[in-house]
Amino acid sequence: MRGKNQKLKLLYLSKIMQEQTDDTHALTMPQIIKELAKYDIEAQRKSVYDDLRALSDFGIEILDYRVGYQTFYYCGARDFELAELHIIADAIASSKFITAKKSKDLIKKIEHMASNYDAKLIDRDVYVSNRVKNMNESILYTVDAIQNAIADNHKIKFQYFSWNIKGEMQLRHDGAFYNISPWALLWDDENYYLVGYDEKVDDFKHYRVDKMLKTSELDENRKGATKFRKLDKDVYTKKHFRMFGGKDERVTLLCKNEMANVIIDQFGRESTFIKVDDEHFRARVDVIVSDQFLGWIIALGGDVVIEGPENVKERLVELIRINMDKY
């Protein structure tokens, strides 16, 4: 009597080859037949040869090599190389945006894209558990709601919160819902942000996605399309230093030459550089001036100095004075 799972033979064969073989691990024909038998599938050599060819024709590359009188079969090229899976897993593990629990779940799913042997190399549990991670478990549902609303050209509503000194969620605006037209999701400084149009102020605002709660799609069309077409998302991210708010300014910086990498990393290669002397250059950058931006300047220890405008210089001096008084 033939095995009860005979109709699933090709599917199980694909599973066996993708999970148990790779560039350094292979199976002989008797071993493949034995593995199929574990799934209650009876197989003959000739039919397995045909099935392996069918898998290759379908796009699951099956290769073979001989050692003496034995032929070994293994799964070759995959959708993702092991190095690529490492990068994806490490990005998920290091992301503060994704909770520790969801990070582990996602990495386990990624492991299924590799053989059982390579999956062990991808495991990054120790890195996930030792990093500061987000605590908002609903974050992926929030992202899904935002993406669906963007695709449907609809507004969304949500509550927004901050953490208080007790480590508790504290709703902003007394828990009132924000009514926003979502236009883009941006990633900056290890956090995920929604860029949305607020009709009340006729301008764009950004919100930390992990601080959004009860996000849902509304049956209202989005507003702000004309303004969004004029919005350069890359420039928006660069100008909003660490995505904090403030006044939009063109700031002139006097920098030591070794600071060129730092300025380009932060503001991009489009920044205007002018040679001052053999040791310095001048950079003009467009930035939303916030205390976080000024703190970044201070942290550079005099290697980058604000030359203008005067109101920004005065604000920096005031920030230094306030902090000096506290110490």
Image: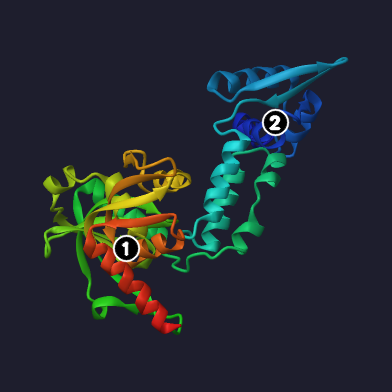
The residue positioned 54% from the left and 22% from the top of the image is: 58
Residue 39 or 232: which is nearer the viewer?
Answer: 232
* Tag 1 and tag 2, C-beta contact below 8 Å: no
Dot 2: what SS? loop
Q: Residue furthest front?
A: 277
Q: Residue furthest right?
A: 68
The image shows residue 121, relative to residue 247, as above or below, that is above
Q: Which residue is mark 2?
A: 22
Q: Which residue is mark 1?
A: 244
Residue 202 percent across, percent down from the top left: 11, 59
| For marks 1 and 2 on the same chain, the one whose residue lies earlier in the sequence | 2
Q: For mark 1, does the 10 Å Cα neighbourhood hold few (<14), some (14 to 19), or many (20 or more) residues? A: some
Question: Amino acid type of disc 2?
Answer: Asp
The residue positioned 45% from the left and 84% from the top of the image is: 166
Is residue 24 at all visible to an observer of this figure? yes
In the displayed structure, does residue 224 sit left or right of residue 21?
left
Residue 201 or 123: which is nearer the viewer?
Answer: 201
Residue 268 or 6: which is nearer the viewer?
Answer: 268
Circle 1 or circle 2, nearest the eye = 1
